[in-house]
Image: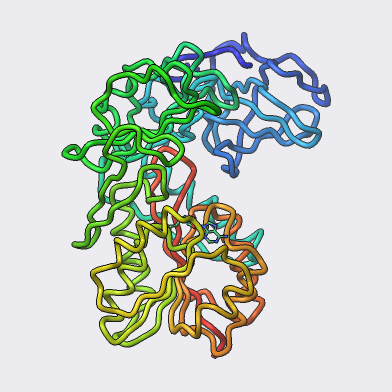
Amino acid sequence: MSETTEGPLPKRSTNDTGKHRDASASGATPEIGQDIEVEVGPIAAGGGCVGRAPDGRVMFVRHSLPGERVLARVTGETRSFLRADAIEVLEASPDRVDPPCMHAGPGQCGGCDFQHVAPAAQRRLKADLLAEQLQRLAGVDYRVEVEEVPGDPRGLAWRTRVAFAVDEDGVVGLRRHRSHDVIPVARCPIAIDAVNDSGVTNARWPGVRQVEVVASSATEVPVVVVDTGTGRPRDLPEVATGIMWRGRTLQAPSHVTFDVLGHRFTVRAGGFWQVHPEAGRVLSEAVLEGLAPQPGERACDLYAGAGLFSAALARAVGPTGAVVAVERSGSAVADLEVNVADFEAELEIIRADIRPDVVARRIGRPDVVVLDPARAGAGIDVMTALVGLDPPPRAVAYVSCEPAPFARDLRVALDAGWSLASLRAFDLFPMTEHVEMVAILQPPG
Ligand SMILES: C[S@@+](CC[C@H](N)C(=O)[O-])C[C@H]1O[C@@H](n2cnc3c(N)ncnc32)[C@H](O)[C@@H]1O
């Protein structure tokens, strides 16, 4: 593990003597823990900037910014690249700021990538990353602005869900970057107050390895999802929250609610729901704008979760329209059934693992499709089945939080003659390298 440096990174003018400068000659093989002076270039997936080590290997330097000259401490290596942390800034980027979180920095919490970056510059870096992945994996030159969403302009107080780690003594914290160490943390500045004020981080959780706090607002009771690894939790602390363990309610409530575009959704804690408080609205609006579902149409919601997009589609297609939602998680389907119960559109909920045959044979012939797969993307086979529907949907909205699998899946559509009609990207994960995208795909002709 690398030595810990707390607080903002020390900055040094270029006229300072190079007392930390690594003396290794060009070509020497760097060792873990060695400090190397380096000028870094573009941002890379993973949140570090690309530099070059003396032996020619690529070096991914976290806590740096494009164009900066930093002293980088080597923290890990593979045959082809090195990992490093910028432990001192020799020439700072104008986009650098002091991290608002005391737990951010080299050797510290692994949760955030961009605490040292001004919010507007974070969005530019994410746009760079997205453009690079689209070019490399989908073969398209397409650059979008990453759109700011309403919230704290510093990029704080947005997480409605935080999975805190717990150490052997039951103390709550967050994991050190690329480590099992738990750094005790009382408050996470990117979490909403309802998470930080839940009392969960101040309590002791003996025998527990993770407590995930799920909260929707200051007025609703949060729920803690407890992970013990193996046995039933014992000696749980007294907390004024719901407590869930392996899908069982140990202490009510077990669900949280979220209001999106005038509709109330109920979601079991531990089930999937978008993390940013504005995400449901922003993504629903982008999907509706891109697909423009019409009254009477048939819409399909693949990877439907608790029904965020099913509800938006059901409202849009109205009483003469139909929505078919496909989801494999039983508890998500239970929430989905409740969340779409009040709409007049014909609703069909299919609990299934989405595979090519499900797309080809069970969803009928939809006019519009939303697909919002997990981080790994839909995959080449499912995409091939989707763009091979005959007749094809008139539009598909692909919602993704991971540029690389999205770009791979986009390539399948483009190769089948489909076009990328529009792409929007939203900063729904401030302080991290992550970005959420809504792409609208249209069939040939
Ligand atoms: C990113 S979430 C999206 C949920 C929903 N669209 C939303 O925004 O709240 C992905 C969902 O896909 C489901 N899922 C993942 N892989 C699946 C598969 N192969 N077949 C069916 N559902 C799947 C997960 O259970 C999860 O509910």
The answer to which image quadrant residue 384 occupies is bottom right
**Residue depicted at x 38% and y 17%:** 235
Task: Indicate left or right for 273 with 107 as reference.
Answer: left
Q: Position of residue 418 (x, y in %)?
A: 57, 80
Q: Position of residue 274 (x, y in %)?
A: 38, 51
Q: Where is residue 445 in the image (x, y as percent from the top left)?
A: 54, 91
Q: In this view, does 61 lie above or below 37?
A: below
> Dividing the image into 4 quarters, which one contains the N terminus?
top right
Q: Is residue 388 above or below residue 64?
A: below
Q: Is any atom of residue 445 visible in this view?
A: yes
Q: Is residue 259 above or below residue 119?
A: below
The answer to which image quadrant residue 409 occupies is bottom right
**Residue depicted at x 44% and y 75%:** 300
Q: Which of 41 and 185 is in front in this view?
A: 185
The answer to which image quadrant residue 293 occupies is bottom left
**Residue depicted at x 33% and y 18%:** 237
Mark count: 0
Q: What is the image's colouring? A: rainbow
Task: Indicate left or right for 33 with 216 as reference.
Answer: right
Task: Indicate left or right for 377 with 240 as reference.
Answer: right
Q: Is any atom of residue 96 visible in this view?
A: no
